[in-house]
Amino acid sequence: MTEGYSGSDLKNLCVTAAYRPVRELLQQEREKDKERKQKAKEGTSSEDASDSKEESTEEKITLRPLNMEDMRQAKNQVAASFAAEGSIMSELKQWNELYGEGGSRKKQQLTYFL
């Protein structure tokens, strides 16, 4: 899913995904404000409006947990900073083969008993 993404790209991807529930919550709050304003225009009494304000201040705000769809949407917004077949990526892959997780240092395991 994230082939070619650098560490910084992955951080940006996670931050973008984490903001998605926050944006949804803000959108819900805007809709609630519009409804309150519309009710006030329609002639709702001031006592009812003050009661609803008291209820909303007592409300605890909770964000939903992140899910895979958040990550997919964030991936559509955050692109890899390097081209997958660019010269920098080929150098990085070469380094990873030599020294990284799949590199030669794992193939040559030294024993403690000589």
Image (spheres, helix red, strand yellow):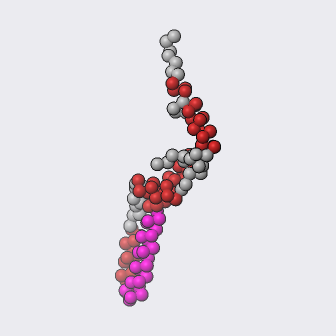
Front-most of residues 37 and 72: 72
Q: Which residues are magenta?
A: 22-44
Main SS class of the magenta portion in the image: helix
> Residue 40: in sight, yes or no?
yes
Of residue 31 and residue 104, the one placed in the foreground of this image is 104
Q: Quadrant of residue 79?
A: bottom right
Residue at 58% over, 45% down: 85
Label total for image: 0
Give above or below for 16 relative to 44. Answer: above
Q: Is residue 110 above or below residue 79?
A: above
**Residue at (55%, 26%) from the top-left corner?**
105
Most extreme residue toward the front, as rendered?
85
Relative horizontal placement of residue 108, taking residue 45 as reference (left or right) = right
**Picture coordinates of residue 5, whole percent (x, y):** 54, 47
What is the residue that sits farthest to the top in this orientation?
Answer: 114
Residue shown at 44% from the left, 61% from the top: 21
Quarter-of-image position of residue 78: bottom right
Verify whether residue 32 appears in magenta. yes
> Compared to 55, does 21 lie above or below?
above
Asked if the stretch drawn in magenta spans residue 40, the answer is yes
Q: Position of residue 36 (x, y in %)?
A: 41, 79
Q: Give the residue displayed 46% in from the left and 48% down from the top.
A: 1
Residue in front for this viewpoint, 105 or 65? 105
